[in-house]
Image: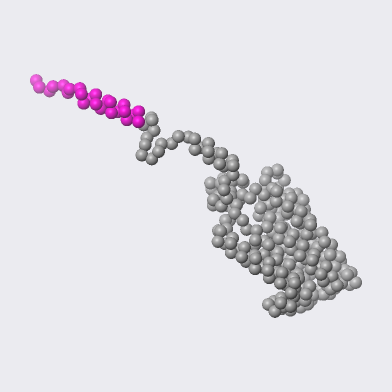
Amino acid sequence: MASTDQSGDRVLRETTWVSVVVVAVLLPALVILWGLPAHTKTLWAWTIKPAMTPIFMGSAYGAGAYFFTRVSLSRRWHTGSAGVLSAAVFAAFMLVVTFAHFGKFNHGNAPFLAAVAFYGWTGVYIVSPFVVAWLWMRNQRTDSRRADPGDPVVPSVVRYFARAVSAGAIALGLVFLFSPTAANDIWAWKLTPLAAGVVGSFTIQVGTGASCSRSTSAGAHGDSSSSPSSSLRPSSSSDRSASGARSTIPTPAPGSSSPASQHSRSQSSSLFRAMEAKPLPSTAS
């Protein structure tokens, strides 16, 4: 489970438990939408056609269940921060989509499981945008923005490319939300306006996550000298203080020598001159 120590960059206990609840909500969605796409009339909050749409939605919810499982088991917050933020953004757009197309839902006038799915869907998307956003802001305070040793480092050019892809994904998602007709012109299968809004929300979620790439440095959780990411962020004040303390130790300039070595050479030179001035004993008989 998540770490409970009071050091930085930890997953808070409340984040862990909410992640477990999210997984419990998403797994049934995965089973129904991906596993039983032809039965949404009796098992889901609204009837979805064609079958490719619930399969797409189910696969996305399955990915979400996997991600939040990782968050619930993680010891470090920074590995899941971007995904939690993008989940909050996704839930907010899904709330808008739900109320914009509220008449398309079964409103509980359906078989038992479909009625449960409707009330569950509505309740989840009323609550989750605010709860997940609050958890992200609360947990983000523990993030020192410094990488662990061994964390993969994304080069700047890749981050810039990811942000360009992010902008494109968010723009495309907005097209799906506000112009379902245009969405059908570019999508692989026919989408209803409600389904187009759902697909657009998923697309915006991906774009939000891609936009969160950032520069970090090591040192908060390990030795900064051994991490390849240490050059990506200016050193902290404590690092600079330590460097300043080290810099006060005198070191000889290039081409010069220390006082100790100069004194040693002076003694050697004096001894050599004394030996030269003393006459050698005569060898004549």
Residue 128 image position (x, y, % from top left): 79, 59
Query: With 245 as the anchor, is 59 left or right in this view?
Result: right
Q: Nearer the viewer, residue 247 or 118?
A: 247
Is the residue 27 above or below the residue 184 in the image? above
Return the x and y of residue 189 as percentages of the image width and height. Answer: 71, 78
What residue range appears in magenta?
Answer: 262-285
Q: Residue at x 58, y 62 (%)?
A: 160
At horizontal 68% and vertical 67% (from top left) the residue drawn is: 170
- As drawn, which residue projects farthest toward the top? 285
Q: Position of residue 14 (x, y in %)?
A: 77, 51
Q: Residue furthest right?
A: 109
- Depth order, front residue of 40/213: 213
Please state if 203 lies on the left or on the right of 256 as rendered. right
The answer to whether residue 12 shows anywhere in this view is yes
Please name the residue shown 57% across and 48% down the image.
234
Where does the image place residue 258, in percent across and percent down from the top left? 39, 33
Colouring chosen for the image of the structure: one colour
Along the line of sight, which residue is nearer the eye, 187 or 79? 187
Residue furthest left in the image: 285
Front residue of this view, candidates 46 and 179: 179
Residue at (69% x, 59% y) in the render: 83
Q: Measured along the vertical axis of the image, is residue 270 above or below residue 108?
A: above
* Residue 152 sits inside the magenta stretch: no
Q: Main secondary structure of the magenta part?
A: helix
The verdict on residue 268 being magenta is yes
Name the image quarter holding the C terminus.
top left
User: In the rendered image of this protein, does residue 39 appear above or below residue 4?
Assistant: below
Residue 111 visible, this angle: no
How many discs appear?
0
